[in-house]
Amino acid sequence: MTITAMLLTGADADHRFHQLTGQGLILTILWLGAVLPLARAGWRGRRPSTAAGYRHLAFMGTGLAASAVAGGGGARVLLAVITVTGALLWAALPLRPRLRGTVCVDPVLTPLALIIGAVLMPYAVDQLALQNAATTGYHSQNPHLFDMAWVVTTLTVLALLGATVRQARGLFGWVAGACSVIGAAGLATGESPVWSGTVLALGAVSFLAPRLAQSRNRR
């Protein structure tokens, strides 16, 4: 049964949070948001943006790191497919993204990125530990705990890149959207209200902070 069907029919309702976030909307959107800009630019013979290149590398790199820690439930097979196809996409690009961005540590966005990491990474560690502990049953066959760790680790890396590389500031838009969905989904499905509310608040701040930084820089 697909994730969409599960959501519509209420199947495995106790995993609704993971269906909405890790295995469902956010992981898929992060993947498509990483590969489609590269493919579109390559099709048009243009050079993909620096941010697009960083986004794709962050998605693959965090997935590989997470699968090295917790590879059960088919996680490593999934990452092998994503990494190989991603590498082939880069090889086929007529012009590759420029990854030598200008390092410019933003005094507002950098502390925000560190706070995001402080909130999300302990959750990632917990999810990977739970995935490794699942040696039998549903969780040993379905790596949705791994998926959650992958999602939040990717968001942390995107936030750090957006805070420290001038050409990657736009990555905070992805952090803002994903954190808002994760936080709202957590509150709606009975996850920890403190953690979910904090993630939702970080999503809102991640939306506003880059705009405040732009206004400050124009002065």
Image: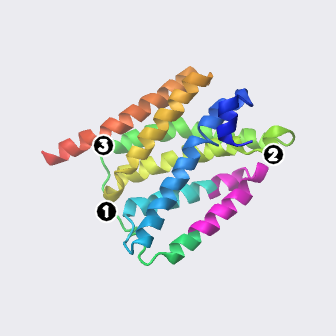
Indicate the amino acid at tag 3: Pro
The outermost residue toward the left is 219
Magenta-colored span: 64-86
Quadrant holding the N terminus:
top right
Q: CA distance from mark 3 to mark 2?
A: 40 Å
Q: Nearer the viewer, mark 2 or mark 1?
A: 2
Q: Residues within 10 Å of mark 1 (few under 14, many from 20)?
A: few
Indicate the amino acid at tag 2: Gln
Query: Residue 86 at what x, y percent from top left?
Result: 57, 66
Q: Which residue is mark 2?
A: 141
The front one of 189 and 40 is: 40
Mark sitting earlier along the chain (2/1): 1
Circles 2, 1 touching at the beta carbon (< 8 Å)? no
- Specify whether residue 67 is painted magenta: yes
Kindly state the secondary structure of the residue where label 2 is placed. helix
Residue 51: which quarter of the image? Answer: bottom left
Colour scheme of the picture: rainbow
Q: CA distance from mark 2 to mark 1?
A: 43 Å
Mark sitting earlier along the chain (1/3): 1
Indicate the amino acid at tag 1: Thr
Q: Which residue is mark 3?
A: 210
Query: Residue 90 at what x, y percent from top left?
Result: 51, 72
